[in-house]
Image (cartoon, helix red, strand yellow):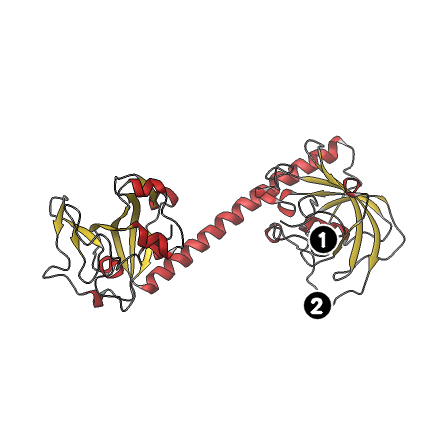
Amino acid sequence: MLLSTLLLAQGAAAQTTPAPGFATLPGSTTQYQLFRRDAAGRYVPRVLAPAGDAPYASRAGQVLLVYIEYRTDRDSVLMASRRLRPEPVPVGLAPTTKPGSIEEAMGLLLPGDSAVFRFNADTAFAQMRQAVPPFIKRSGNALRLTVAAKELVTMEQMQARQQAMMAEMQRTAKARAAKQVAADNAKIQAYFKEKNLASQAKKTPGGTWYVITKRGTGVVPKPGQTVSVKYRGTILETGKEFDSTAKHGDTPFDFVLGQGQVIAGWDQGLAVLPKGSKATLYIPSALGYGERGAGGDIPPNANLSFDVELIDVKGEATPQAAAPAKTAAKAPVKKAAVGAKKAPAKKAPVKKK
């Protein structure tokens, strides 16, 4: 349930008589209980907008940070924001609201206040074009929204916090990615040592390793050209095969090079092979399917090995085409390849999800 949707649940014809302990917002059938902390830290009831409270207009345009819970009328928890995220939920206070609306009542809350709003379930679910679940009907056919107001900030302060949070998330993700890249390369180097491939293996500028087993005599594909490839993909650490063109009638897989239609390791590795070449690509997890993996076949943070044969190079290069990704940070799985020949989207491991 979306907070923004359920906050509109007002004006229903039902429930005009308040439940015990509840009052009714003026101009609405929404019922409420308001509480404020006293000097001893205890919550005590208060009336809506008592004398001495700043008017709603003084809060308009600001952001109220709250914890919210949705419960049935028999107190079963349907959603608790604390379980979804540790931070309070930001609720923007509009410059104007309908008199007696829940938005207005929430705007009257000051940090430290709490409130319980009770409204008709039929109204809320009708606005979402859904039927009221039977268990809610059996629980009084009403919903309760509990709000604990924690902080009131300006829109500028909220935006600054969100920007700082995003920057911190990016720093954390970058550090995690760097750590994973180091771990991946250590495993790949150990594999090369075990298989006596260290002297043969080469690395693209973007981080994909490759060993050419048969060098072709044709052209080296450029971004924007369509390449046709036969492949067999395995998990490097286990050797388990997860896909191959042999599973799809041995039909070569076609894609446009350098357009992000496949995992970054493929865009990088095939860009250095002349037509007719056979090679093995060793792809660190960040240039493959990353920490998400791909279904049940490719686990999270899996290093991949692809035996590939570059069958054909077609079309003209596109000068404006994006070059293959050069850093691990540019290798997240994004989308399915366009124009693949007969290779089902669910089975082509080189496609971006």
Residue at 59% x, 52% y: name it.
329
| Residues marked 2 and 1 touching at CB (< 8 Å) | no
Bin the neighbour count of mark 1 within 10 Å (Cα to Cα): few under 14, some 14-19, many 20 and up: many
**Vertical order, 51 against 289 (above or below):** below
Q: Amino acid at mark 2?
A: Gln
Task: Of the two numbered discs 2 and 1 on the same chain, state the one appearing first in sequence.
Answer: 1
Quadrant of res 56: bottom left
Asked whether 91 or 160 is in front, the reply is 91
**Vertical order, 14 against 198 (above or below):** below
Outermost residue, left side: 51
Asked whether 239 or 32 is in front, the reply is 32
Bin the neighbour count of mark 2 within 10 Å (Cα to Cα): few under 14, some 14-19, many 20 and up: few
Residue at disc 1, secondary structure: helix
Residue at 61% x, 38% y: name it.
183
131 on left or right of 257: left
Quadrant of res 7: bottom left
x then y, percent, for residue 249? 80, 43
Q: Amino acid at mark 1?
A: Asp
Residue at disc 2, secondary structure: loop
User: Which residue in the structure is indicated by mark 2?
Assistant: 320
312 on left or right of 35: right
User: Which residue in the structure is indicated by mark 1?
Assistant: 267
**Vertical order, 280 against 125 (above or below):** above
Q: Which mark is residue 259?
A: none
Residue at 35% x, 60% y: name it.
158
Quadrant of res 320: bottom right
Residue at 81% x, 47% y: name it.
251
95 on left or right of 126: left
